Image: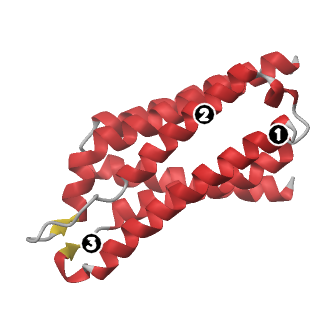
Amino acid sequence: MSHFEIVVTLVTIVYGLMLTDLFGSLHKLIRARDSVRWHWLPLLAAWYILLIILKNWWAISYTQDAEHWKNFIIFIGYGHLLVLLYLLVSSVFPDSIPDEGISLKQYYFSNHRYFWGLMCAVYSLAFIISIAGKSLAGDQIHAMSILLKIAFIGLITVLAVSKNYRVHAILLVFFVMEIIAEAVLFVLV
């Protein structure tokens, strides 16, 4: 079994667990729909996470020949990234629905620091792993790419600290549009 196959096996298992958690949480909300005051923000956040998982899962196959899979430090980094992603997925919807019901908008804003803080940690660690992988491979690291990733992490941080509804609505819609555009460009290029 190659280093890449070991990584893909672990990623596949953990991504499968993440999707099981996400779908199970959504199922609980749908089953208790009479006790749920629905709101689009947490649903869009869940869809955004689903898109991240599916895009990353698909894209990993294109890195099969990358040398960084043979580096144990990179593997440890990816292991920690999987932990952060799992925590992120687990936080998008409530763990349980109280007898008196739940407002998804209220849940979202009472949980936004944890959720977007984890998202910031995910993107920051992924950024560090990407830089380390490129450095190990001797690939050029472009300053514009670094600046864009830092700016993106900054926008995520804004969501972790802000409770402003409009800020969350605008940035979350922007993030979803960005990942869809990234996926379309990935397919076209």
- Whole-percent x, y for residue 111 in the image: 26, 46
- Percent x, y for residue 13? 63, 53
Which numbered disc, 2 or 1, marks the residue that appears first in the sequence? 1
Q: Which type of secondary structure does the marked residue at label 2 adopt? A: helix
Classify residue 26 by image quadrant: bottom left
The colour scheme of the drawn protein is secondary structure
Q: Determine which of the numbered discs, if any, sits on residue 38 in the image.
A: 3
Residue 28: image quadrant is bottom left
For marks 1 and 3, the one nearer the N-term is 1
Amino acid type assigned to the residue bearing label 1 in the image: Phe
Labels 2 and 3: the sequence-earlier one = 3
Q: Position of residue 175 (x, y in %)?
A: 52, 50
Look at mark 2 in the image and give the residue it sits on.
Answer: 79
Q: Residue furthest left?
A: 100
5 w.r.t. 21: above or below: above
**SS at mark 3 in the image:** loop
Identify which residue is drawn at 88% across, 17% down: 138
Give the residue pinned by disc 1: 4
Image position of 189 (left or right of 122): right
Residue under the point 87% across and 27% down: 67
